[in-house]
Amino acid sequence: MSGVHLAKESVDRFVSDTRPAGPRRPLVAGSVGPYGAFLLDGSEYTGDYAAEMSVEGFKVWHRPQIECLAAAGVDLVAFETIPSLKEAQALLELLREFPNTNAWLSFSCRDGQRISDGGAFKDAVQIVNRSTQLVAVGVNCCSPELLEPLLASAGSLRTDASWVVYPNSGEDWDSEHGWRTSEKAVRIHTCSQPHVDEARRRLLIGGLLAAIGPADIAELRREF
């Protein structure tokens, strides 16, 4: 029994238990991460490897993953933690080979203006917006404090379309020791209210990622 099948079974049970008063039906997204995650050196947070890869090379690497997820019947593909525009462009070219599949694409970012490879977040959003198969664009695995400036920098480019944001706790990643506490680390509920307000103003898909625990998720849920 595939993971996708199990996830869809869980959705069916959830919908059955919550109808008729429950929310709209949840979707099952299949994750496709960056090539850098395969290298096990933390380069998914820098995008340094992109200089040595071609667009075609990225497509060859990612194609089997998308084929598998599409065949399994995911509702959409989540291209996530993408650090470079070159890899993002390769993924969107590849997505056209699967015309019945939609996706979201979220970048990893180094600061409130730039994605991890140093390119401007605004420019990256402008380019990926050309895809008609993207249901949302955004950021993930960055400090919550970066969300507001990142969205502000590119907000005018997606005024009637969805954003997807799911930060971590702001800690630093060490490829040898894992997540390390840093001065950038924050408790998600201490800075969530601006993001809640932003979510109400925009069409925003939100969530949480690494180094976030059940207590943080419960606190954010109470905010909403």
Image (cartoon, rainbow, N blue to C red):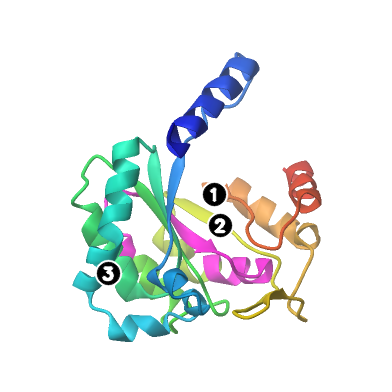
Q: Report the Cα–Cα distance between label 3 and label 1.
A: 29 Å
> Does label 1 or label 2 sit earlier along the sequence?
2
- Identify which residue, 145 or 151, lies in the foreground: 145
> Which numbered disc flags the more N-terminal residue, 3 or 1?
3
Point 46% across, 70% down: residue: 37
Q: Position of residue 103 (x, y in %)?
A: 36, 49
Residue 184 rendering spot, x and y as whole percentages: 73, 78
| Nearer-the-camera pick, 5 or 142 | 5
Residue wearing tag 2: 165
**Label 3, on which residue?**
58
Query: Looking at the rendering, which quadrant does residue 1 occupy?
Result: top left
Span shown in magenta: 128-151
Comparing marks 1 and 2, which lies closer to the viewer?
2
Q: CA distance from mark 1 to mark 2?
A: 7 Å
Tell me the residue that label 1 is attached to. 204
Work out whether 193 lies above or below 223: below
Residue located 51% across and 80% down the image: 41
Q: Residue at x 57, y 79 (%)?
A: 111
The amino acid type found where label 1 is placed reads: Leu
Amino acid type at image mark 3: Phe
* 153 sits left or right of 51 in the view: right
